[in-house]
Each structure stands twice: as structure tokens, then as C-alpha cells.
Amino acid sequence: MPPWLQTALRSWLSLATVDITPLRRHRDFRLLTGWRAISFFGGMITYTAVPYQVYQLTHSVVATGALGLVEMAGVLGFALLGGALADARERRSMVLITEVALMGTCVVLIINSLLVRPQVWLMFAAVGVAAALDALQRPALDAILPRIVDRDELIAAGAVGTVTMTSAMITGPAVAGLMIALIGLPLTFGVNLVTFALGLVFLLALRTVPPPPDAERPSVRRVIEGFRYARSRQELLGTYFVDMIAMFFGMPEALFPAIAVGLGGPKVLGLMYAAPAVGSFLFSVTSGWTGRVHRHGMGVVVAAIIWGVAIVGFGAVPGLAPALFFLAIGGAADMMSGIYRNAIWNQTIPDSLRGRLASIEMLSYASGPSLGNFESGVVAGLFSIRASILSGGILCVVGCVAAAALLPAFRAYDARTWKPATVEP
């Protein structure tokens, strides 16, 4: 092979494969990645099994969509508190305590599924409590990453995280669908309980992550400081609004159980939940080139538009295989958006505000899918499943274009030229 061709191939491979430098260099990042792999896998099992059981008991797409409202209520109630605590307390302890509490919600789901008549209200309660605990945990978890890798490794670390997450999102629903069909719901939830126990081993080995030196006691004033900073930065507002628009209009997951009934049951349901993750995974493992893109705001906008187009395709095509293809395209677009949103957050937010800004970001990405699932369920109940999916995808594209037009600083954000505020809150 000619030398010039060897050089070209090496260059192409470096751009088309994920950069694992942070894994090689940082012990704590390896531990955090191991925990995330186990945690996401178990979480996706429950994420698939709960709406399946709710639909099995109620035969209502509105009921499965209402799970999203319960999740949103938990997030809205506790995310800001979680952010304030993450900026004032030792962050690893926050993750550990909430993880143990989340195990308790898994136990409740196991016990409920063993009852002769499982209680739907108890499932909603467990989902709401789990969402609240996740809202307390996630800001501390997000604030840990910039402390354990170097700044120039943030995009690579984010890509490794997405590969881990999407791998679990592929295997989790697929395994859940098979387990529901073969061993039943109680043992399916039990597998998630085992993953909690394994994940704690990794968290306990992680070094402590103390709060910033200028940390203060949590207070309303400190929370308001976070909102003021976010409001002053169009590049941050753009990431919140575009993601919320895309998820609110283009999130049809609440309809998956009803769609799966006519296509093959729980095994097909697992494939539908896994398909977006397949697209995300393929994008992640070929994401080396994303480090060469510096217009991150425009990258988020383009990705959200592709997501909307993919949802339109999912609603328009007949048959399982084409539907899974468009869901995979949507998953790839969602991952592209996530990589660039995380880059903007990690590059522009001061460490003293990371927890509070992570809680605001959580409000945006959690409320969007939760409300979107409810919206898709209501529209499907009023009209039809196909009308719900198609209208949502179209409104997603229109909304994202409008947000980009109204936020020029976000649209023009360039990591090479961005400068922090002269005075930070």
C-alpha cells in the first residue's frame, strides 16, 4: 500500500472512531464509565417494562403517556434542589445516596408485579419517586465529569459516555422484551435490582469530588444566580429550547406499546425502544470527526431538524423494518445534538455553577420527553397514532428553525472564539 494511502487511511480512522484517550488517562473516568454502563443497562430494562405493564393493565395509550407527566413532576419538584446541593456538597456522596434510594423503587416494582392484581397507582408512585431521586442525582453526576478529565478531553469523554449509554440502550430494551416474554415481569425487574448492586461497587471505588472552594450553603438566592447566568447566555438558552421543542413535538415513545401489539408483542416493543439507541451507538463509535466541528450551536440545530424529519419518516412508512430504520436515524441525530449540547455546557459554565446549571439543563431535557410522551398519547387518543407522529415531526422541524432564527448568538456559537463573561455571577 502506498505511504500516502496509509496516511490517508490513518487520518480517516482517527476521524471516524471514538477517541478513548480519557479512558486511558483517568482512573476515575474508567470507574464512572463502568458504573454508567451497568446503571443504564438496568435502567433501560425498567424503562421498557413499566410502560408495557401499564398498557397491559389499562390498554390505554393515554395512561402510558401519563407516566411522562409523573416523571416530569418529580423532576420539576427536585431538580433545582439537586443542582443547589451539587454545588454545595461532596458530589460522589450525592450520587451514592440517591442510588441506594433508587434501589428501593426497584424493590417496590418487584413486589407490585408479584401481586395477584398489580396496582397501577403504585407503579405511577414508584416512577414519580424515581424521577425525583434522579433529579437529585443527575446534577451532581454531571458536575463530576469536568473535574476528572481535562478540558480538551471533554468532547472525547462525552463521546465515550454516549457509546456506553447507547450500548446499554440497545441491549437493555432488547433483553427486557425477551425477559418479559420468557420469564415474566417480576424476574425482569429483579435483574435491574442486581445491576444496582453491581453499580454500587464502582461508585464506592470512585474518589470523592469535593464542592468548589467558593461553595456556599444551598439557598434560593444561589438558585436564582444559576437562572440569571443561564438567561444571560443565548448559547445556553438555545440548547435548552431546541431540545425541548424537539422532544415535546417529536417524542412518540408512549405510543410504542400500542404499536407493538399489532406487530408482534413485547419482543417487537424491545426492538422499537432499542432502534434509536442503535442509531445513537453507530453515530457515537464514528464520532471522532465531531471534535473538528466548532460551530456547536449550528450542530445542535441541524441535528434537531434531522430528528424531526426522521420522526415524520417513522410515522409515514408501513411495516416494522422501515420504521426501525427511521427510529435509528432519529437516534443518530439525537446523539449528534447531545454531543454538541454537552460541549457547549462544559465549555461555557463555571465550575461554581455547574450543579445549578445542570439542574436547569435537566429541567429542559426531562420535561421535553415527559410532556412529549403525554402530548403524543393525547393526540393519538383524539385522532390516530399516525396523525400524532406525523404532526409531531413536522412541528419539531418548524419549531427548531424558529428557535435558531430567534437566538443568533446560539446559532453562531463557535468554541474557538467564545469568551467567558467578564464578571460571573
Image (tube, rainbow, N blue to C red):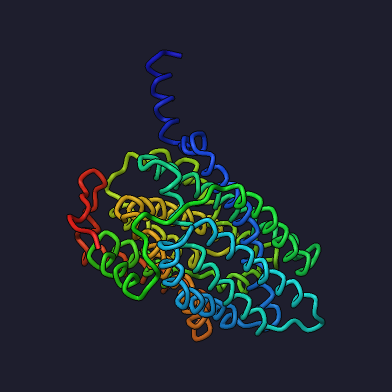
Whether residue 98 sits left or right of residue 403 in the image: it is: right
Q: Is 40 placed above or below 64 here?
A: above
Residue depicted at 40% across the width and 62% down the height: 87
- Residue at the left extreme of this rendering: 422
- Rendered location of residue 201, percent (x, y): 66, 51
Q: Quadrant of residue 105?
A: bottom right
What count of labels does the image hold? 0
Residue depicted at 67% across the width and 57% down the height: 174
Q: Quadrant of residue 16?
A: top left
- Rendered location of residue 385, percent (x, y): 53, 76
- Rendered location of residue 160, percent (x, y): 49, 44
Q: Dividing the image into 4 quarters, which one contains the C terminus?
A: bottom left
Residue depicted at 75% across the width and 81% down the height: 118
Residue 402 seen in the current view? no
Residue depicted at 17% across the width and 55% down the height: 422
Residue 235 seen in the current view? yes
Nearer to me, 22 or 390 = 22
Whether residue 389 sits left or right of residue 341 in the image: it is: right
Nearer to me, 153 or 384 = 153
